[in-house]
Amino acid sequence: MAAPTSPSTRTPGTRPSPAAARPSRTPHFGGVAWHGYGGNVSKQTEVHNQYPQLDAFQTECSGGTWIANQQREDMMNIIDYTRNWAKSVTKWSLAVDQNRGPHNGGCGTCDGLITVHNGGSRHGQVDYTVEYYTMGHLTKFVKPGAHRTASTAAVPSVVWRNPDGSKALLAYNDSSSGQTMTVNWGSRRYTYSLPGKTSATFTWSGGQADGSEQSGSLVGLGGKCLDVAGGSSADGTPVQLRDCNGSAAQRWTTLADGSLQALGKCLDVTAASTTDCAKTQLYGCNGSGAQQWRHETGSAMW
């Protein structure tokens, strides 16, 4: 990608930090920020493979006059950034006026997601740019706390699993002709003919057809629901009974590995205790016995 006219503070996305360039050292920071104006996005995966404990964030990219096909640029960027471990996609400008301003020495050729007209016969009117709709494929269907799911495809695509158990698949057909794509989810599948130069997002809920995954509320004593206190996803958050309200804090998903998940984390027995009255909490999934739950045949779960 060509670099825009921009402040000198912008750096290409291919430069790992000094710490990341020295594999023998443990970095004393929590993540790496990447900008999308040049280089090879696979560098994100190279750094991840050396330091898997570090988060990667795509903290700046932009559309502008230097980009010939904004739809293609955006869709390929969203797919490539997130398939190479980025946990975010951030645009340089959310809103600019018809002159791509105002700015104070910044980028004068960058577009925003919306254009707000300033002055003239269209003063105050809003235009929605291509970037508004391409980013909508991501922001409308992929929820905070979602996890990317490994996938392979004939067309560029990426898949996420949301905290409520729903899935979102974003795909872009870069070919001029239509392509037939088949989505396989366990023993379930569907086929769609994606027209040329078209982007689409597909969503579905529920588990694979073997019944290993189900989502819903867990209702207990007094008709109340199992609830994550305060709707917090922080490790150690207590799990309690509360009046059912249909919130994400009360939506639980059983997975084939025996875990019971809400808000992207697992129901966990505190300190792995096996004593009577041991407390439960929400905690990062780790596959331990403290996070293994079994549905007894003949009993109602959902």
Image: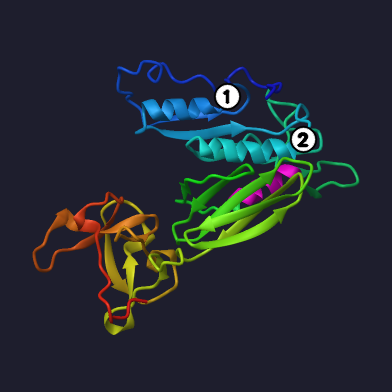
Task: Give the dominant element type of the magenta stretch: helix, strand or loop.
Answer: helix
Can residue 251 be seen here? The reply is: no
Q: Residue at x 61, y 57 (%)?
A: 202
Dividing the picture into quadrants, the one containing residue 103 is top right
30 or 114: which is nearer to us? 30
| Residue closest to the far bottom | 222
In reply to whether residue 57 is colored magenta, the answer given is no
291 or 298: which is nearer to us? 298
Query: Which structural element holds mark 2?
Result: loop
- Packing grade of label 1 (10 A; few <14, some 14-19, many >=20) is few
Q: Residue at x 18, y 63 (%)?
A: 279
Q: Is residue 172 left or right of residue 300?
A: right
| Residue closest to the far front | 187
Q: Which range of residues does the magenta coloring cover?
A: 129-138
- Packing grade of label 2 (10 A; few <14, some 14-19, many >=20) is few
Q: Residues under labels 1 and 2: Cα distance?
A: 19 Å
Name which of mark 1 and mark 2 comes first in the sequence.
1
Q: Residue at x 32, y 80 (%)?
A: 300
Q: Which circle marks residue 215 in the picture?
A: none
**What x and y, as percent, mark residue 244?**
39, 76
The residue identified by callout 1 is 40
Q: Which circle marks residue 69 in the picture?
A: 2
Query: Which structural element holds mark 1?
Result: loop
* Residue 183 vertical placement versus 58 (above, below): below
**What x and y, as percent, mark residue 46?**
45, 25
**What x and y, as percent, mark residue 269?**
20, 59
16 or 244: which is nearer to us? 16
| Residue closest to the far left | 275
Under mark 1, the amino acid is Asn
